[in-house]
Amino acid sequence: MGLWLYGERVMKTWSILRLTMAVLILAAMVAEFRGAMSTTPAEGSSMATVVVNYFSYFTIESNLIAAAALIAAGVWALTRDAQEPTWMALLMAAATTFMAITGLVYNLLLRGLVPAAHPWANEILHLIGPLFLIIDLLVAPPRRRLPWRAVGAVVAFPIVWAIYTLVRGEHVVSPLTGDPWWYPYPFLNNHLHGYGVVFAYVVGIAAAFTLVAWGVVAVGRRRSPEAVADEKDAGLSPA
């Protein structure tokens, strides 16, 4: 249904852009991973902990999801003359939500706190990638319309991640400092702020995820081929 709204050339162009962005994200992640592997773990820690810690950052998880979503959407549009399946639209909605939050949290709360080992990779993961997903939502060929319950499905992942992070954090020796705890982000570290402040951050971020997910689904529904078809049938838009 998407091809009657957007020409084949536009669909192909966006597919190539999505695949290119996915390659850039993966390249940035490889660079950051290689940097992490240069860490000499403190006493009581290990390289296995370094690896698990790397993949415990929400930035890394959101970028992995974004790369997977962009590859899936790009390949689908290049090889299929049909609208993407619901699971792919949900994956794109999740990727857009997670990357938008990653960009917001990093640039508002974390930028400048830790020197970036690879500035180019850092910008791709925290700024360029999030901006691309937002632009993709707004101007790329429209995605399949999702039901409102998709908001809950999107928000479920960061809730599970937050629980995992808070539970695991107290049982991991930091590879860098040797402290008997490790948290990926300082605002989740109760040893720095206390549980009250951490709880406030978690509630605030959960609210932000819900709001952004709602906005992503709302924009997708408004721009979807189904919505345009409904308007045509109702005589609200020109044929």
Image (cartoon, rainbow, N blue to C red):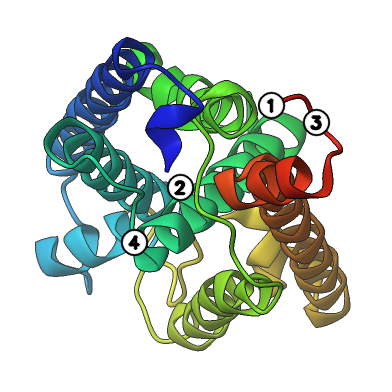
Q: Residues within 10 Å of mark 1 (few under 14, many from 20)?
A: few
Q: Evaluate whether residue 19 shows in this view.
A: yes
The image position of residue 56, as x and y in percent, is: 37, 64
Q: Which residue is mark 4?
A: 85
Tell me which label, 3 or 2, sits earlier in the chain: 2
Residue topped by disc 2: 59
Near-viewer residue (208 or 238): 238
Q: CA distance from mark 2 to mark 4?
A: 26 Å
- Between 194 and 94, the one nearer to me in the picture: 94
Q: Quadrant of residue 9?
A: top left
Residue marked by disc 1: 239
The label on residue 237 is: 3
Element under disc 1: loop
Alpha carbon distance from label 1 to label 4: 26 Å
Secondary structure type for disc 3: loop
Look at label 2 and name its amino acid. Answer: Thr
Q: Nearer the viewer, mark 3 or mark 1?
A: 1
Q: Are marks 3 and 1 in contact (CB under 8 Å)?
A: yes
